Image (spheres, rainbow, N blue to C red):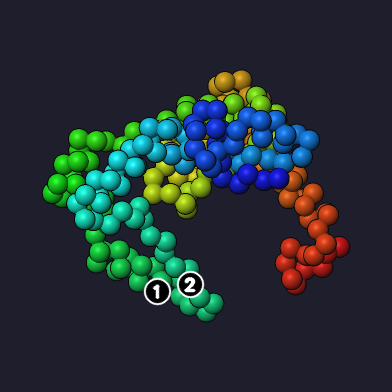
Amino acid sequence: MIFSHSSVRALCDHPRNVADDILELLPANGGVLQLTFVPVFIREDVARWYEERRIELERLGRSTDLWRWVRAPQPGESAEAVAREARADLDAEPGPEDSDGEFGRWLAEHPRPEVTLAQVADHVEHAREVAGIDHIGLGGDYDGVDVQPAQLADVSRYPRLLGELAGRGWSRADLEALTGRNILRVLRAAEEIATEPLWPTSPLR
């Protein structure tokens, strides 16, 4: 079992997070929880802020979409051309976060709660305590949300999280398990028992 983008329900009661009684089953299953950095999965007050934001946008008659997915290039299509198209589309239609007028005033009066690096580390540590070091990993979800914790703003910040955990006593072996060894073990095990190849052009054995 792989929970690819979840945090722990004990610290934030979000439906995408995993409860302790499920985490306790992972060792017997051999699975992995890939802890994510999605702010609404880390702090409940962030989820409440987004709901209040949605209500305000509806009151103002504005779009409540958080953001839009940019389409992927088709085979043989220029990625640069698709990027230019997406940028032109985004520039032409202001999003809901425009800081003008009444909604801008609401944003100024209701700042979004900030998730800290330490709070993300708290989720990672809780998962280790319940599921064990061999059953946790990282699934930051950098292409799935509109904002990440400030100290984990992009993938270059992973070392900051590892430094935080090392400061809490995590060993090099623990960090290696967290950052890749565990999920690779599960993927290899899945491949070994698969009855069909993962890729149609690849032999199974």
For the point 15% across and 50% down, which residue is it?
A: 100
Mark 2 vs 1, N-terminal side: 2
According to the picture, the residue beneath numbered tag 1 turns out to be: 81
Q: Amino acid at mark 2?
A: Pro
Please tell me how crowded label 1 is: few (under 14), some (14-19), or many (20+) other residues with Cα within 10 Å: few
Residue 175 lies, with reference to residue 93, above or below; the image says: above
Please tell me how crowded label 2 is: few (under 14), some (14-19), or many (20+) other residues with Cα within 10 Å: few
State whether residue 68 appears in this view: yes
Label tally: 2
Could you say whether the residue bearing mark 2 is in a helix, strand or loop?
Answer: loop
Quadrant hosting residue 89: bottom left
Q: CA distance from mark 2 to mark 1?
A: 9 Å
Answer yes or no: do the residues labelled 2 and 1 have beta carbons within 8 Å? yes
2 vs 1, front mark: 2
Residue 80 lies, with reference to residue 97, above or below; the image says: below
Q: Amino acid at mark 1?
A: Ala
- Residue 73's tag is 2
Q: Is residue 76 left or right of residue 178?
A: left
Q: Position of residue 113 (x, y in %)?
A: 34, 33
Q: Quadrant of the C terminus?
A: bottom right
Q: Position of residue 88 (x, y in %)?
A: 29, 68
For the point 65% across and 24% down, which residue is it?
A: 129
Q: Position of residue 119 (x, y in %)?
A: 47, 28
